[in-house]
Image (tube, rainbow, N blue to C red):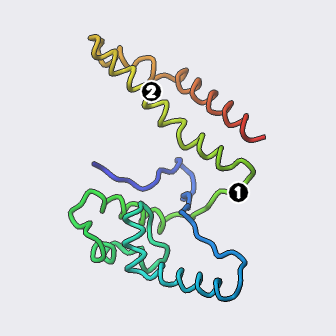
Amino acid sequence: MEVLEAPEFEGGEDYAVQQGAGMAVTKTDEKQMYASVQFLKWFTEDERNIQFSVASGYLPVTKTANDVKKIEETTNMTGNNELPIVKAAIDTVNHNTLYTTKAFEDGTDARNILEYAMSDKASADRKTVVKRLEKGESFDEAVKDFVSDSNFDTWYEATKAELEKVVK
């Protein structure tokens, strides 16, 4: 397995998407607001936040907790395949300008389309390739319909049309 930082276009700038599960304190009475703030302080203490974040597939929320040695000491990742992923993610955060997308109406629907469009297509195409291989086609024959600009263009136009139905 090889883990790399997020790619960048040749001549492009170092940007990466920043996202997370997010937590918020809503307007409420003073007692509940105080309790919420205390919980967030407790939850984001380095050791606790490292354990939760790594177990749930996120990076910790503080700069001090985003330390590979501290993560190794706090978790059982040493010698584990996940450690290179964490190192690459921390390098990406430390070497890129982070941005987050702006919220917009039907944004969750648009995000779901974008999140699954490629993986769903790849999964469906793979099933077809496997069936073709099982029927005796060579690898090149089995994949020829899927490794073309026209296949990509068809997928792109279908994805774009689906987005356009959602985002007006």
Residue 72, located in which quarter of the rendered image? bottom left
Q: Residue at x 46, y 53 (%)?
A: 6
Could you say whether the residue bearing mark 2 is in a helix, strand or loop?
helix
Residue 165, located in which quarter of the rendered image? top right
- The percent position of residue 82, horizontal first and vertical second, equals 30, 59
State the residue lying farthest toward the top. Answer: 136
- The percent position of residue 35, horizontal first and vertical second, equals 58, 85
- The percent position of residue 5, horizontal first and vertical second, equals 42, 56
Residue 49, located in which quarter of the rendered image? bottom left
Q: Identify residue for label 1.
A: 103
Which of 120 and 4 lies nearest the eye of the viewer? Answer: 120
Q: Residue at x 57, y 27 (%)?
A: 155
Q: Which amino acid does label 2 sit on?
A: Ala
Marks 1/2: CA–CA distance: 31 Å
**Looking at the image, residue 112 lies above or below residue 89:** above
- The percent position of residue 140, horizontal first and vertical second, equals 34, 17
Q: Residues within 10 Å of mark 2 (few under 14, many from 20)?
A: few
Q: Which residue is drawn at 42% across and 68% down?
A: 53
State the residue lying farthest toward the right. Answer: 168
Q: Which residue is drawn at 48% across and 22% down?
A: 148
Q: Which amino acid does label 1 sit on?
A: Ala
Q: How crowded is mark 1: few (under 14 residues within 10 Å), some or many (20 or more)?
A: few
The answer to which of marks 1 and 2 sits earlier in the sequence is 1
User: Is 109 left, or right, of 96 in this rendering?
Assistant: right
Quadrant of the image for the C terminus? top right
Q: Identify residue for label 2.
A: 124
Contact? badges 1 and 2 (CB < 8 Å): no
